[in-house]
Image (cartoon, rainbow, N blue to C red):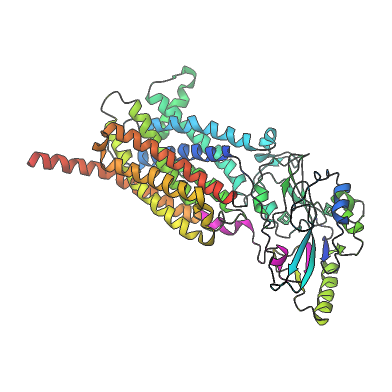
């Protein structure tokens, strides 16, 4: 495990995103990820990517928010990726420690160590990871680890024309985000709220300023570490083991007593 | 306002081979668990032939391991689970049930190996002169002063092995798999009845005298009681799933769970065991044991594939 030099991350201001998908393209280009097969129409609004997976490390969500009486409509956009969680479920369940924390406090998949067991896919509470077609191993956003190592910002952040994706030190980004949140609330956008501050999984290094509830953006309101049930699983197993052991031994021994009873009954008859 | 609660969570799409693997792993563990417990704490009653359960465990464990490796996308790297090449260390991640499970499998494998040597010695099969010492150690561990300790520790690892894949799916973000901590419990109970059923079949088909009859009947007694426990546990499990119960009770999964597992795989065998005259004692034993196996397989299919296919 490397020493953390400084926590790098991203602040995604959804109010500034206009859904141009430049980040998606930049990500694919920099990381040499093949283009999606064309035409790949999902039938879900203008979204032809579908979701995050091994072939799409960044995904711009297009959410058509229409009021019940259909008189009011608006677009919500969210440029989504791995959140580089402080408490990363994917990392904690990996059986080969192929998922590591880098010196930038980001979460990185070592493709040479990954065995493709897919356990991390279920470990991530955001559905981020997928198996990459080319590598055949688990893949997700690396926060452009190779670029960070040479002092560059991630490709998506550089490509974003509206600065909706801000890259930097997490502490600076949080301060910037809080200020922006206050600004928005003061100007009447009462639902504006940070998602991924220290309240979620110890803090997400890639966090969001949302204009509505997390659920509306397809984000879980209360994501949990996959281990939340592990202790319960062990305890219920121990309990059932006692039950099974006891039942087995009692049944095994009771056979003898029944036989004896049968023999005695036959004799006395 | 419309709410776009897009469920992004992904299924790991574990292949069918994993269901089969869970099934045979359960049999291997269940057979060992019950045998070790009975040999250690079964009293002074007739235990003829019980040691043959070790053939079942040793026969299935290598297949289990092989299928587990075949399931990996990078099969050739399976050693990475035991050895961290990057840092040159032994690989163990205490937070990861898969990492712990791999070690448990190996330790359990050692117990299975020692125990099968004991079975070979007892049955006078494959007696290699160069392995005399090994046979002697295996016999000592089963019949000597340390027998209870050895068998208890072996049973402990068998139990851990039988439930770790349950812990593994419970430790995930997939709703239904993580809605209750009861899947490992289901796995242990099912492992016991399927494991013992296979041992019963083995004893039945290798029974040339009557000395095994008592052991078979006793094992059958165990299956009867654990079947009741299994039915109760399935009901508790479905209730505990709450809003996610639909993942295992909808459409074909519901038919398989209630019809295939509970009725065909548990209630019919129980009836046959309680009323052996319906088909004759031997036929009832064979038929009910086979049905228990079918039910055990379907249970794993429903609990694994149901939630996975919900997305
Ligand atoms: S968002 Fe998912 S993949 Fe990314 S660090 Fe967190 S748990 Fe891992
Ligand atoms: S940080 Fe790099 S890898 Fe991650 S989404 Fe942006 S461009 Fe892709």
Question: Can residue A57 be spotted in the picture?
Answer: yes
B205 over A229 or under it: above or below: above
Residue at image point 74% right, 71% down: A212
Q: Quadrant of residue B148?
A: top left
Judge from the rendering whether residue B242 lies leftward or rightward of residue A264; answer left or right.
Answer: right
- Any magenta on residue A209? yes
Question: Can residue B145 be spotted in the picture?
Answer: no
Q: Quadrant of residue B120?
A: top left
Q: Picture coordinates of residue B202 (x, y %)?
A: 38, 29
Q: Nearer the viewer, residue B42 or B296?
A: B296
* Total tally of numbered discs in the picture: 0
Judge from the rendering whether residue B43 lies leftward or rightward of residue B120; answer left or right.
Answer: left
Residue at image point 86% right, 44% down: A32
- Any magenta on residue B218? no
Judge from the rendering whether residue A14 lies leftward or rightward of residue A159; answer left or right.
Answer: left
Judge from the rendering whether residue B24 lies leftward or rightward of residue A125; answer left or right.
Answer: left
A102 over B210 or under it: above or below: below
Q: Picture coordinates of residue A57 (x, y %)?
A: 79, 51
Q: Magenta segment range?
A: A206-233
Q: Picture coordinates of residue B293 (x, y %)?
A: 42, 38
Q: Nearer the viewer, residue B7 or A48?
A: A48
Q: Nearer the viewer, residue B25 or A208?
A: A208
Q: Quadrant of the C terminus of chain A?
A: top left
Q: Picture coordinates of residue A63 (x, y %)?
A: 76, 63
Residue furthest top in the image:
B129
């Amino acid at each position: 495990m490397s020493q953390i030099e400084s926590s790098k991350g991203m602040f995604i201001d959804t109010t500034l995103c206009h859904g141009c998908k430049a980040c998606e393209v930049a990500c694919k280009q920099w990381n040499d990820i093949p283009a999606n097969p064309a035409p790949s129409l999902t039938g879900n609004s203008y979204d032809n990517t579908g979701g995050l997976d091994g072939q799409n490390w960044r995904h711009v969500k297009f959410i058509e928010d229409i009021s019940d009486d259909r008189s009011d409509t608006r677009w919500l956009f969210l440029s989504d990726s791995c959140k580089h969680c402080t408490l990363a479920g994917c990392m904690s369940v990996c059986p080969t420690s192929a998922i590591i924390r880098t010196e930038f406090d980001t979460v990185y998949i070592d493709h040479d160590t990954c065995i493709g067991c897919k356990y991390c896919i279920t470990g991530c509470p955001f559905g981020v990871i997928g198996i990459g077609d080319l590598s055949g191993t688990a893949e997700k956003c690396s926060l452009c680890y190779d670029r960070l190592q040479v002092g560059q910002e991630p490709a998506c952040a550089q490509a974003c024309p509206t600065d909706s994706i801000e890259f930097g030190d997490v502490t600076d980004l949080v301060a910037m985000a809080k200020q922006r949140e206050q600004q928005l609330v003061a100007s009447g956008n009462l639902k504006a709220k940070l998602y991924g501050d220290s309240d979620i999984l110890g803090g997400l290094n890639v966090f969001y300023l949302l204009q509505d509830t997390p659920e509306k953006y397809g984000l879980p309101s209360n994501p949990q570490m996959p281990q939340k049930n592990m202790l319960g699983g062990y305890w219920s197993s121990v309990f059932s083991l006692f039950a099974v052991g006891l039942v087995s031994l009692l049944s095994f021994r009771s056979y003898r007593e029944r036989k004896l009873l049968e023999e005695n009954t036959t004799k006395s008859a | 306002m419309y709410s776009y609660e897009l469920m992004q969570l992904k299924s790991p799409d574990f292949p069918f081979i994993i269901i089969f693997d869970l099934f045979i792993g359960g049999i291997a563990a269940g057979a060992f668990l019950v045998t070790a417990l009975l040999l250690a704490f079964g009293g002074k009653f007739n235990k003829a032939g019980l040691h043959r359960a070790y053939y079942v465990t040793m026969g299935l464990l290598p297949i289990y391991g092989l299928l587990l490796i075949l399931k990996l996308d990078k099969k050739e790297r399976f050693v990475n689970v035991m050895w961290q090449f990057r840092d040159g260390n032994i690989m163990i991640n205490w937070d990861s049930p898969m990492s712990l499970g791999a070690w448990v499998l190996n330790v359990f494998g050692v117990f299975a190996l020692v125990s099968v040597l004991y079975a070979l010695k007892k049955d006078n099969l494959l007696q290699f002169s160069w392995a005399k010492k090994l046979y002697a150690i295996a016999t000592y561990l089963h019949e000597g002063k340390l027998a209870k300790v050895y068998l208890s520790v072996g049973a402990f690892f068998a139990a851990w092995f039988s439930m770790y894949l349950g812990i593994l799916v419970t430790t995930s973000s997939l709703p239904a798999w993580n809605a209750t901590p009861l899947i490992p419990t289901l796995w242990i109970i099912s492992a016991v009845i399927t494991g013992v059923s296979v041992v019963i079949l083995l004893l039945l088909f290798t029974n040339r005298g009557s000395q095994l009859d008592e052991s078979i009947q006793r094992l059958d007694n165990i299956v009867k009681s654990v079947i009741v426990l299994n039915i109760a546990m399935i009901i508790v499990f479905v209730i505990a799933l709450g809003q996610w119960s639909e993942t295992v009770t909808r459409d074909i999964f519901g038919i398989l769970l209630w019809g295939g597992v509970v009725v065909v795989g548990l209630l019919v065998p129980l009836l046959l065991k309680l009323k052996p005259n319906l088909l004759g004692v031997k036929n009832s034993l064979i038929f009910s044991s086979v049905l228990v196996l079918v039910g055990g397989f379907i249970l794993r299919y429903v609990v694994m594939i149901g939630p996975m296919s919900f997305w």
